[in-house]
Amino acid sequence: MSPVSRRTVLSTGGTLAALAAGGPLLASCGGNSAPGGTSSGGAAGSDAPVAAPTFRAPEGPEPDIAGDADIPDTFFSYPAEPTVSVPEAPGDGQPLRILTQTFSPVTAQPPQNTAWANLNDKLGSALEIQQVPSGEYATVFATSLAGGQLPDMFFLAEQPDMPDMVEATCLDLSDHLAGDAILAYPNLAAIPSDCWEAGRYNGRLYGLPSPRGAMSSGVLYRRDDLLAAQGVAPEWDDFEGFFSLAQQLNDPRGGRWATTIVPGQYIKNMLGIPNFWQYDGTTMQSWWTAPQMEEALEAQRRWAEAGLMNPDAFASPNTKVWFSTGAAYFNPDSFSAWSQYFADPPEGFDIDVCQIPAFDGDGTGHLWMSFPSYGRAGINRNAADRVETLLKVANYFAAPFGTQEYLDVKMGQEGADYTFEGTDPIATSTGAANSALGVRYIADCRIANYLPGHEDSARKLDASIRELVPDAFRNDAVYLYSETVESDFASSAQMFNALEADIVQGRKQVSEWRPAADQWWADSGQQMAEELTEAYHAAGRG
Amino acid sequence: MSRHHRRLENGQIAPGPGERVITGIVLLACVLSVLIPFLGIVSTSVSSSEHINQAGGFVLWPGGLNLDAYRSVLAGGVVTRALMVSIGVTTVGTLLSLTASAMMAYGLSRPGSFAHRPVLLLVLFSLLFTPGMIPSYLTVRTLGLLNTYWALILPGMVSAFNIIVLRAFFMNIPTELYESARIDGASDWSIFARIVVPLSRPVLAVIGLFYAVGYWNAFFGALIYLSDQSMWPLTLVMRTYVLDNAQLSAGDVGVAGDALPPQPALQMAMLLIAIAPILFVYPFLQKHFTSGMLTGAVKG
């Protein structure tokens, strides 16, 4: 009887992999991976890593304010004559099946959905898209994997044993993408090189990234219009100054609180706590064991005790609505949420991002830089005969800002889904919903800073990013692989999150944190750090 | 007996004015605790963006009345179609479930029926376990039910708990009725259709409502079994609006658009559309529901 390897088992539909996943499948979601940042493939593997895809900047319109590797380009208006980045329809006339996640309400099907129908026409292949609500994506992915029902292209949800699962399920794209090979797909080549690490497993390239970078980093927003109405300058030099200002603004009787929720990450940023894993020159250090954690927890506990956040903050946070409707002055969100707030702004709406002074006023704090890519998408191993077509379609999805293809993918069909105001495409009342097809999680371009009709606001956002990003802390373990992280991280995170919530809400003492952190370090934390350090060195990062 | 109390015709003592006031206040509080959130849902769904913003996201009394949220939700036909799917699955599923459950319960209620005890034990045994998500999925796939409405009905068509309840009810039907029917030459089918079912209308109404509410609220089966989202029922579509706090503005891709109804109004409109059918059906079943729930509760 021939031995049955793990790979053999996985390749028979991945059933056992999904069965073994159990609970964590339900808890995890592809997205930016776990905060541990190590759930993707990483460079640790027996094979020599293939070269990263060559980066080549897109040949598109000049931005009004040019960005760089970390800072997005800023455009005040859409180019009057969008460039064409994909001259020929990339499809082969056959249906193309996609499994992806969505954060939007489910869309209508073509032909009612004009954006979808238009994209089918432009691609030359009919897209059969299964859009799954993001919260349930891991579950649906696991069952599809188990049942051998994965389609041609799919967003990869986090799974246990990711490298083997990916190898058994996805097509190795290295020959098509590594080095200069990617130049056959110019829009994919315009994706920054570091994003491709999200899809690297056992040294090979399996995944297509969706670039995010700085734009997905979490910051603290403030309502400048409301603060101005109170005659308050949004300035503070340290945490105590911020706390005093919040107390001054807090007005529960008037239905307006200082913050939507306890600004935990902002406080940690003020204290300079690592962005989860930080390489100190010798080994990886975790935020859970950071010496500043007790101070961060005590500050959060004081915030909650003083009632400076919405009373529903812990039970059912509806932060975007509270912030938009003026029920709070400050709200933690990402840079990319800026454009959401300007989708339908109230009269006089004015926001900005708070600077991050040091907790004690001595210097500055440090933003946590988000992952370069929002997860990764794979191409089914069984679709090897169509790989070039599928990559051409991905190339279409990744069309950069300023191109006609960008309008097709992001906006839909001119006239039905958007109309032009000047040169700016403005979505119709149905267009925004129609175009939210979820293909941006299969392949995407870099996010541009673009707020049509709000040039001042776009400048403000650009200035904020430029001010905060240079001092930002990166997660040094991003896209590195560790077996212990994979097996133990989720349960560790669950334990620490619960403990943090208990402490902040006064159910446990701050003093209970250190023993728990020390115990975790002894049980598995140190092992994680050692494995990640090894992977860090193996990847040539340190 | 206090001078404030009087005896009712049935011999019970009528409550005094104080007790009635307290009872009234308690009941009023209960009613308000249901009505106020419901009023909020209706009011928010028909209020203008400005009014919702002023109220902090949840409106108790509407302002700037409009039906934009309903127009927006019903545009494109997704919600309308999902509503039809839910009604269809609930109707067909309830009928099939009720038929299968009643027939099985009847068989299990008759002593001496074929394999009576082993089958009953199997039914009881199934109460102890629930199938895992992936085994269920693999079973449905093997049966060729993926992407069919049957996947929403067949896996949960018969509930062991409901069979036990129905069996208990059928066993309380006087034996003499069965015997007299037998003497008149009735077969088991005739006894079931002409005697048992007509006498069991209250319990069938209750169990039917249980099944109907179950089918109406179910979303998980649709999520994993139906990749064609045009087949999704209303609850799953509603979930994408409400629980995921989805933004119709698609602002995360930097898209500008015409002003859409505010998110709270859209969410509340969806909630109302989802609960309206059950609200309409319930009054017609209420009479049976009350008597059915009391069935077997009091031994005479």
Image: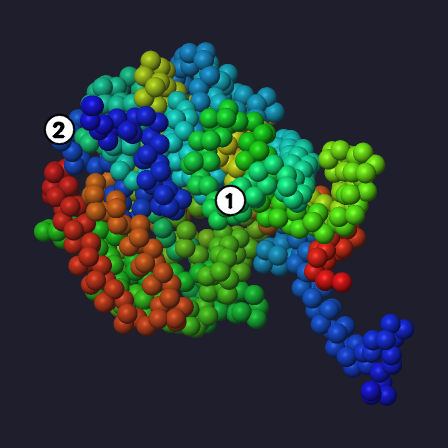
Q: Secondary structure at mark 2?
A: loop
- The percent position of residue A442, horizontal first and vertical second, equals 38, 29
The numbered mark at residue B126 is 1
Front in this rendered view, residue B127 or A426: B127
State the residue lying farthest toward the left.
A282
Q: Which amino acid is tagged 2?
A: Ala
Quadrant in the rendering for residue A87: top left
Residue hosting label 2: A48
Q: Nearer the viewer, residue B149 or B106?
A: B106
User: Considering the numbered disc 1 on the image, is that residue within a helix, a strand or a loop?
Assistant: helix
- Percent coordinates x, y for residue B83 in the rendering: 66, 36
Is B268 placed above or below A72 here?
A: below
Both on one chain, marks 2 and 1? no
**Please, which chain is the residue tagged with disc 2 on?**
A
Q: Residue furthest right?
A: B9
Does residue A336 appear anywhere in the picture? yes
Q: Residues within 10 Å of mark 2 (few under 14, many from 20)?
A: few
On the image, the x and y values in percent for residue A386 come to 35, 15
